[in-house]
């Protein structure tokens, strides 16, 4: 069986973040399954500004939900942490998430992986549809799951919200021969990493399409961003 690596980023620097980090993992274990794939779960933690007590609490949460933790000894950076998280595991697919998103009902993600495997024009499958516009075209798989085409020139076509991608997303040329999307990187004009509109522009110019599972299956479970302070940072 092929493998889907669930790759989360987290920064457990206070009790509030620890609470929604655990809520996110709890919902993942409760609702996310893969009928034709093996799921392995990982989390990449920011380590700076994390107390010894919170460090131990985060480890305990990982043990509780059978998640393998890794720890960054680098300056906090959401983009850098996402890069590190995506390097964890060796599966064919990566299910990405930040620690402030919670799954809200059961979902089998194997059909989404099947879509990526059979359709080389798709860059990724989104599971959050917040603030996203669609083209008006949709499709169903054999299981009756519904997916919609994301409007690439609409707001938030890419989004750092939970989504499924191929493991070689960053280095894979598009079906039109477009350049690979690349990794998150330091941006002098951005906040902390490659902004969503820049990533979306790369996808558009390289001929990619994005689909989204519909209806939405995740909710934001934190009242503040899981990102480090919003300023240009080294990735």
Image (spheres, rainbow, N blue to C red):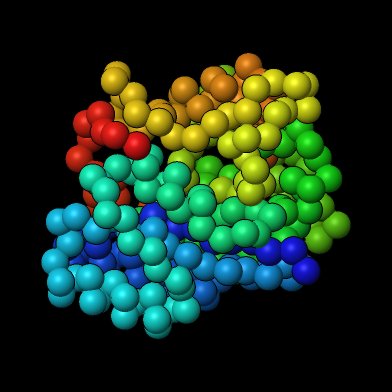
Observer-nearest residue: 230 or 107?
230
Count of number-bearing discs: 0
Observer-nearest residue: 235 or 116?
235
Q: Residue at x 26, y 33 (%)?
A: 233
Q: Is residue 113 left or right of residue 181?
A: right
Does residue 134 lie above or below 226 as drawn? above
Q: Locate residue 152: give its quadrant.
A: top right
Q: Position of residue 25 (x, y in %)?
A: 43, 69
Q: Residue at x 22, y 70 (%)?
A: 55
Q: Position of residue 19 (x, y in %)?
A: 27, 69
Q: Locate residue 170: give its quadrant.
A: top right
Do we see residue 24 in this rendering? no
Does residue 111 lie above or below 154 as drawn? below
Do we see residue 67 in this rendering? yes
In the picture, which quadrant includes the C terminus?
top left
Q: Residue at x 23, y 35 (%)?
A: 230
Q: Position of residue 193 (x, y in %)?
A: 36, 33
Does residue 105 lie above or below 192 as drawn? below
Q: Residue at x 34, y 29 (%)?
A: 186
In the picture, which quadrant includes the N terminus?
bottom right
Q: Position of residue 222 (x, y in %)?
A: 29, 56
Q: Is residue 134 left or right of residue 187?
A: right
């Amino acid at each position: 069986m092929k493998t889907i690596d669930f790759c989360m980023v987290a920064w457990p620097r206070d009790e509030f973040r620890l609470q929604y980090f655990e809520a996110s993992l709890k919902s993942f274990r409760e609702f996310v399954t893969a009928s034709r794939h093996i799921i392995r779960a990982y989390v990449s933690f920011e380590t700076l500004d994390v107390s010894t007590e919170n460090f131990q609490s985060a480890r305990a949460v990982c043990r509780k939900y059978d998640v393998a933790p890794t720890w960054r000894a680098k300056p906090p950076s959401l983009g850098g942490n996402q890069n590190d998280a995506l390097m964890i595991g060796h599966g064919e697919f990566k299910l990405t998430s930040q620690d402030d998103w919670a799954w809200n009902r059961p979902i089998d993600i194997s059909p989404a992986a099947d879509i990526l495997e059979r359709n080389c024009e798709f860059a990724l499958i989104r599971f959050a549809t917040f603030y996203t516009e669609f083209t008006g075209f949709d499709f169903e798989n054999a299981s009756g799951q519904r997916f919609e085409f994301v409007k690439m020139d609409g707001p938030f076509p890419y989004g750092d919200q939970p989504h499924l991608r191929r493991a070689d997303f960053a280095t894979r040329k598009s079906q039109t021969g477009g350049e690979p999307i690349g990794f998150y990187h330091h941006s002098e004009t951005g906040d902390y990493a490659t902004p969503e509109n820049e990533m979306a522009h790369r996808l558009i110019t390289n001929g990619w399409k994005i689909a989204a599972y519909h209806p939405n299956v995740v909710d934001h479970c934190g009242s503040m961003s899981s990102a480090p302070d919003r300023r240009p940072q080294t990735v």
